[in-house]
Image: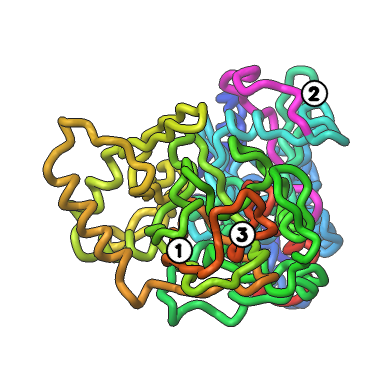
């Protein structure tokens, strides 16, 4: 049988001690690949062949010193085959040399410096996970740190300054790491999946765990829009997930067959559009109420309430937080013209990045003012035309040639306030170039809504417009029920849509589309 010597004559191989206690370092050297090779040799080789293996390694075995070498080897074999090597290696009893610098499970390797723990293994990213002790202590999920039922944090970031673990071991057969923080005996157990979710340096695991990649925006021209852009209302009620994904990915959805016959005018209760809006999320109330009617008004205070051509724009950019999802339900449409137009403004922004990066940078850095001063209201706010996502939300794997991640587009000429007199000439030129890209026929989706159809779109990404229309009847009526073109609208916030989509995705066991 193989005899594993306690010390050999080879030069020592450096390792990173897991314990910061300097008094224990001299007796706790261990080289991970060697031990794993030794263990795997014992596991897979017949016992009769073990004596033929001439093994020398510079480490201390985690066994009592007085134990005979033959017994020591047998003990390693037995405990490994029982899946308890982690228990053996984690032992800190006086007769054991405690391992301070290696993996304690076959597929994980733990190393430590004074401020962080590094974990590597086949199931982890190639570079492994580097976890600062500050982060680990602050992210403890035990019942003392996170309330079991509310899942709310019970400690504050900064309560634990420069924590140093007393011991770090792998538990649950390699699926978790347990850290003893000392002091009052506080132990933290971190599932490897939890660590991958929040500490993957590529950010890929986090995106997957929150389904960010599943419903990431997909830019489009008209020819790129899928068949899922149209859906029957009954189908959406039965299985809303495909429609939710369509709306999040492309920012546009046409719903057919939405009840409209009993719809009444006014800002409160509405039938069809309210049912659809409540399926998507929670209705947001604005200065126009919970619901609003798009009809012709005498002496209108909004160009939308005329029969004129309404050019590409976004709603309510004069607010600090414009509404995100907009619904326009066609109640009546018996006029000539009046087609609805939609354009993917992020697609045009990406094209501007490719064609004229200086113009892109100008629109991303200079804010444009918007205002609404009418009907007893005075609203004003400024936004950059191309609003970039903050740095922490930019893809870590983004190439220099790729456009940055765009959070929102803010483009609404009808509600634009006068620019500052100090605005640089390049801003005017950049807006002209961007407008030219927005008005290309290839990107213009035009659809005349039929009665009972509802357009649902992302008001922070997709521009909408309406062509002029004509009617031989008298449109100057105070009754929406008597007009020949009538749309009922409302807004829904995107957080509610994201919430419901993630819940449905988590329940869905089949492959994602």
Q: Does the stretch in magenta take in 429? A: no
Q: Earlier in the sequence, mark 1 or mark 2?
A: 2
Q: Quadrant of residue 453?
A: bottom right
- What is the span of residues highlighted in magenta in the rendered image? 152-175
Q: Nearer the viewer, residue 203 or 217?
A: 217
Horizontal side of 15 relative to 196 (left or right) equals left
C-alpha separation, residue under disc 3 versus residue under disc 2: 65 Å
Q: Give the main secondary structure, helix, strand or loop, of the magenta stretch.
A: loop
Q: Secondary structure at mark 2?
A: loop
What residue appears at the point 59 percent right and 53 percent down from the top-left corner? 477
Q: Which residue is mark 2?
A: 185
Above or below 324: residue 146: above
In the rendered structure, the answer to whether residue 159 lies left or right of residue 17 reads right
Note whether residue 129 is visible. yes
Q: Residue at x 64, y 65 (%)?
A: 330
Residue 123 screen position, x and y as percent: 63, 62
Q: Position of residue 112 (x, y in %)?
A: 55, 39
Give the answer, above or below, for where 159 lies relative to 448.
Answer: above
Secondary structure state at the residue bearing disc 1: strand
**Which of the two discs, 1 and 2, sits closer to the camera?**
1
Please tell me how crowded label 2 is: few (under 14), some (14-19), or many (20+) other residues with Cα within 10 Å. few
Residue at 20% from the left image edge and 65% from the top image edge: 355
Q: Residue furthest left?
A: 425
Q: Earlier in the sequence, mark 3 or mark 2?
A: 2
Instruction: Describe the element under mark 3 as helix, strand or loop.
Output: strand
Cα gap from disc 1 to disc 2, whole angstroms: 67 Å
Residue named by callout 1 = 466
Dot 3: few (<14), some (14–19), or many (≥20) neighbours within 10 Å?
many
Which part of the image, by quadrant, shows the N terminus? bottom right
Residue at which label 3 appears: 487
């Amino acid at each position: 049988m193989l005899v594993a010597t306690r010390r050999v004559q080879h030069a020592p191989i450096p390792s990173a001690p897991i314990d910061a206690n300097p008094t224990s370092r001299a007796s706790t050297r261990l080289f991970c690949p060697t031990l794993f090779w030794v263990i795997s040799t014992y596991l897979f080789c017949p016992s009769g062949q073990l004596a033929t293996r001439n093994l020398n390694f510079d480490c201390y075995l985690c066994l009592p010193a007085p134990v005979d070498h033959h017994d020591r080897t047998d003990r390693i074999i037995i405990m490994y085959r029982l899946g308890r090597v982690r228990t053996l290696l984690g032992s800190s009893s006086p007769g054991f040399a405690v391992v301070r610098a290696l993996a304690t499970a076959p597929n994980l390797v733990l190393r430590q410096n004074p401020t962080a723990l590094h974990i590597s293994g086949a199931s982890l990213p190639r570079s492994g996970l580097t976890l600062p002790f500050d982060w680990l202590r602050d992210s403890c999920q035990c019942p003392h740190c996170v309330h079991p039922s509310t899942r709310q944090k019970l400690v504050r970031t900064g309560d634990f300054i420069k924590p140093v673990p007393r011991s770090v071991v792998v538990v649950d057969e390699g699926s978790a790491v347990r850290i003893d923080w000392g002091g009052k005996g506080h132990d933290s157990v971190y599932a490897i999946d939890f660590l991958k979710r929040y500490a993957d340096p590529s950010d890929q695991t986090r995106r997957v765990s929150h389904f960010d990649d599943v419903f990431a925006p997909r830019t489009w021209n008209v020819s790129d829009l899928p068949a899922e852009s149209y859906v029957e209302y009954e189908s959406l009620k039965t299985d809303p997930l495909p429609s939710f994904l369509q709306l999040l990915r492309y920012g546009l959805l046409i719903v057919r067959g939405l009840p409209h016959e009993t719809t009444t005018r006014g800002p409160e209760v509405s039938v069809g559009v309210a049912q659809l809006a409540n399926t998507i999320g929670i209705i947001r109330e604005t200065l126009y109420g919970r619901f609003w009617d798009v009809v012709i008004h005498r002496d209108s205070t909004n160009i939308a309430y005329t029969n004129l051509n309404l050019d590409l724009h976004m709603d309510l950019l004069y607010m600090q937080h414009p509404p995100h999802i907009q619904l326009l339900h066609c109640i009546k449409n018996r006029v000539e013209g009046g087609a609805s137009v939609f354009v993917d403004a992020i697609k045009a922004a990406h094209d501007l990045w490719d064609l004229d990066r200086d113009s892109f940078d100008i629109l991303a850095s200079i804010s444009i003012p918007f205002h609404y001063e009418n009907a007893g209201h005075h609203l004003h706010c400024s936004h950059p035309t191309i609003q970039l996502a903050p740095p922490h939300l930019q893809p870590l794997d983004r190439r220099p040639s790729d456009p940055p991640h765009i959070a929102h587009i803010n483009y609404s000429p009808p509600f634009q306030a006068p620019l500052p007199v100090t605005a640089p000439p390049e801003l005017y030129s950049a807006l002209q170039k961007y407008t030219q890209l927005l008005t290309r026929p290839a990107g213009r989706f035009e659809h005349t809504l039929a009665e009972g159809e509802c357009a649902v779109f992302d008001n922070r990404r997709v521009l909408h417009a309406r062509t002029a229309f004509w009617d031989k009847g008298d449109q100057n009526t105070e009754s929406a029920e008597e007009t020949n073109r009538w749309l009922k609208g409302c807004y829904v916030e995107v957080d509610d849509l994201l919430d419901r989509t993630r819940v449905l995705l988590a329940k869905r066991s089949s492959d994602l589309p």
